[in-house]
Image (cartoon, rainbow, N blue to C red):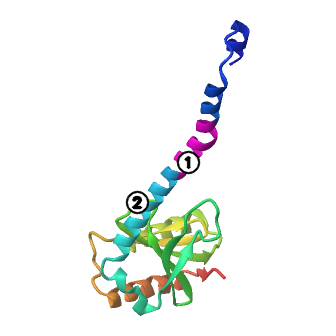
Amino acid sequence: MSVAYMTGNVPNGQLLLYVLIVACIGIPVLIMLLGYLIWQVNHKGRLKAFAKTPFDQVDKIGFFKTHTGDTSKWSFTDEIKEGNINGFTLRMDMSKEKGQRFIEFDIPVEWKKLDNGEFNRLTEEFKHYNAEFRIGSIAKHYDTRQQTIQTISDLKRDLELFTALLIKEGFEAKS
């Protein structure tokens, strides 16, 4: 624009108005539209994963609907399931890292200091349960395409065994 002023070619007001409209209105609307489309794809994937047996029956073992992101002005609200087993709160959601075909149960735990040997031992043991450490929690994954668990009672038993393992290893539920 400064080149235009130095050469004497001053842009007309109509061009300036178009640039301002695109910059101030068009780009933010485009960004919001892309955010909505991404949320919509994730929402449809979550509904599809939650509709598969036995995950569609978690209400029978004490899980209830709850919302995530409902207080954020930067994200859309998502509906997940939450329950309590062996004193631990479990949040059932679609896995963000592994994709839409995986359901994860996120278990917030009080963090404890582990030396490298203990951490590696627990990591290997958790791999047998399709679980992994996260910051402030432990996540247990289920592949919805290759289900080894067919009934809701099998799912409940598996989650009870895993939370019993957490208790045995000295983890405590986050308060």
Q: Closer to the camera, 135 or 52?
A: 52
Residue in the image at 43% along x and 86% along y = 161
Residue 62 location in percent, x, y? 47, 91
Q: Is residue 4 magenta?
A: no
Q: Is residue 25 magenta?
A: yes
Q: Is residue 115 left or right of residue 148?
A: right
Q: Which contiguous range is marked in magenta? A: 21-32
Q: Closer to the camera, 26 or 144?
A: 26
Badge 1 amino acid: Val
Q: Closer to the camera, 111 or 70?
A: 70
Which residue is situated farthest in the top direction here?
7
Q: Secondary structure at mark 1?
A: helix
Residue 104 location in percent, x, y? 44, 71
Measured Cα–Cα span from mark 1 to mark 2: 18 Å
Q: Which residue is mark 1?
A: 29
What is the crowding at mark 1: few (fewer than 14 residues within 10 Å), some, or many (at least 20)? Answer: few
Quarter of the picture containing the N terminus is top right
Mark 1 or mark 2: name the one nearer the start of the chain: 1
Badge 2 amino acid: Val
Numbered mark located on residue 78 in the image: none
Q: Is residue 6 left or right of residue 101?
A: right
For the question of whether residue 98 can be seen, the reply is no
Q: Which residue is mark 2?
A: 41
Q: Is residue 73 left or right of residue 84?
A: right
- Residue 175 sits in which quadrant? bottom right
Q: Secondary structure at mark 2?
A: helix
